Image: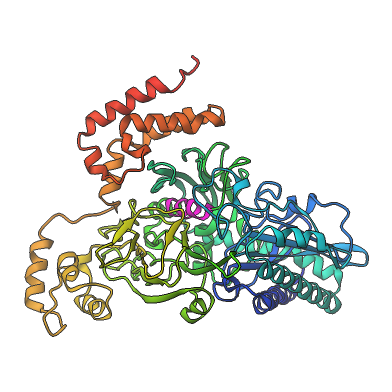
Amino acid sequence: MPLDPVTLGILSHKFSAATDEMTLNLKRASRSVYVKEAADFGTGLVDLEGHIFAFPASTSVSAIERECGATIAAVPDLADGDVIITNDPYRSRGLATHLPDLHIVQPYFHDGRIIAYGWCFIHFMDMGGRVPASISPSNSEIFQEGLIVPPCKIVKRGRIDQEILAIIAANCRTPHQNVADIKAMLGALGTGRKRIADIIGQHGIAEFEAARQEVQDYAAAKARAVLRRIPDGVYDFWDYMDDDLVTGIPVRFRVRMTVKDGEIEVDTSGTDPQVRAAFNLPTHGFRHPWLAVRLTQFMLTYDRSLPLNYGMYRHIKAVNPPGTVLNAEFPDAVGVRHSSAHRYNDALSGAMMKACPDLMPAPTSGVIVPIVLAELDERGGRNVTVVEPLVGGRGACHGLDGTDARDNSAANLSNHPVETIEAEIGAMIRRYDVRCDSGGPGEWRGGVGQIVAIEILRDNSMLLARGMDRMRFIAWGYDGGAPSAPLRLIVNQGRPDEREYGKIDELLLKAGDTVTFLSPGGGGYGDPYRRAPEAVERDVRLGFVSREAAARDYGVVIAEDGTVDAAATAARRDRRMAATQPDGFDFGPERRAWEAVFDDATMLELNRRLGRLPKPQRQPLRRRIFDAVAPELGARARIRFADAFADTDAARRRLADAMKAILPPEAA
């Protein structure tokens, strides 16, 4: 018999409270700044099928859809007091998504049988591998990315396996932090175990087991009610990652969203093939937490009472065919999978905006860039610290500006306090500010990005910044709104030895060097000439918009005293308003120039034919085709597409000839 609504509500809140306590205890016990400050970790309660039935509202990471089933099945004969550990994206079937994310799962017993599991993970500062902090975009195989821990028992009947702990400690650059954080996770699972026992003691095992399923049924029904806000139809959209670092060739993420009565299917069949770099995402062809971010936000925006559990996704189906960057195949490198997930979610945002523009914002900055600094210590080892998980601004929506300098669209990571970072590593944060003119202009302005300037204090320091993107394909604007500014990285800004970089892998620096990151803003929404002049005046006063941009982009003239010159503004806007007003999507000049050659139909055909080839042939043949159109792309030369494809017709002929000459003929 189903539980009555009152009892179900009580148990749902008790489950959530248990996970909140697990979260707080884990954060307090951790030794890592990435946990204590950024809060890149997660906890949850898991049912017998491996699905999360309770998730903390206090968490910062969107991981509600984690699949623990394959990890649990890989370790049979679990006894009371056992704990499973893994970071293997392939053997865990996507529970882990890259090696720095270490997951542990503990069975909770009652009367001699398993009645639930506790789960948690931490993003570890370093898990070994080729570079400090483990993640390098230029890695081509997972073996380069660090120690792989297949699903196994880290605790056996309540006793920690010291040999496994020693292996983990011996294969990383931050052994003391890692061992301490594993113990902090074990403590959090112990908290969950106690709270589950308390709940069963109060309500009985029958009510507990009924609620374990019924909270998911309830979430599924409420989620579908929200998804019915999206009109039925088929919506196509695509977006781009600038390149894969190995080449200068963009990586396209294409989605087809089909909606029918609150049932959603997202098909990524037109997405580009896997790359020989670390941007592949190990979905195993399933719906995946990283690919559900935008839909998660949509559901929770329009129903804040929605219980956080696996049931939210019951009416969402994913099609991620083999061979694409969104379905990594062993041994693909996966370390920077969040960049691909970001761009996929921006493509999904575009499809949803086509369906219900009044309910969706323009795209966010589209980046999370963990800035990692590694320096030699007195013993010749490496001190590794994440200086800042750099983000940008959020996109504007109908009636609301984007959030400034806090893009939490993929994970709501906190910034690292300057004092904490300066105490841990040889660097000084010389500037931490908002970035003027970085948000897309619009009637509702895109949120601005950040400026973070770091002075290096020690020679032979190494900077790594994985996840850099939106340097070419910027966050687009909608309905007359304009795109954002691009990401920039400048070393020694304002000095004679100033130099600007594109995407980097490892950057060796000396004492006295400065590194300045300028993150992108979000896209603008609506015609900027319709923005209230007093709102533009406020933006100028706060440093979000310059006086020059106020006049150029918004038609608002700011006088010397900082107030709006009403007469000059009216005259300027009258001239502009007489022109044809823009509408739809504004993708920026680089995307327009690119798609004048590489249009959707051609790219679908290219990817369809590449997808039919054996995996080792896909990337080499793809690269040969792009080299035939623009050799500069393969060499990663910093070119403007408008210059490279000035003769669009000639470039399209080269593309057609290359596809005909290089791709194997298809069978009749």
Q: Residue at x 76, y 74 (%)?
A: 187
Circle count: 0
Compared across the picture, whether 296 is left or right of 529 comes to: right
Q: Is residue 446 above or below residue 564?
A: above
- Helix, strand or loop for the magenta stretch, by majority: helix
Q: Is residue 446 left or right of residue 507?
A: left
Please state the horizontal and vertical placement of residue 86, each as a whole percent of the image: 72, 56
Q: Foreground residue, 346 or 177?
A: 177
Seen in the image, is 621 located left or right of residue 261? left
Give the magenta range: 336-347
Q: Position of residue 535 (x, y in %)?
A: 24, 77
Residue 47 position by quadrant: bottom right
> Considering the image in quadrants, where does the N terminus appear?
bottom right
Q: How far across and how far down the image is residue 640, in percent?
A: 26, 45
Q: How is the image coloured?
A: rainbow
Residue 182 place in picture, x, y as percent = 72, 67
Q: Is residue 217 left or right of residue 653?
A: right
Tell me if residue 178 can be seen.
yes
Does residue 641 belong to the magenta stretch?
no
The residue furthest right is 112
Q: Residue furthest top?
A: 668
Q: Residue 406, located in which quarter of the rendered image?
A: bottom left
The answer to whether residue 47 shows anywhere in this view is no
Residue 342 magenta: yes
* 133 in relation to 541, above or below: above
**Residue depicted at x 19% and y 76%:** 533
Q: Residue furthest bottom?
A: 561
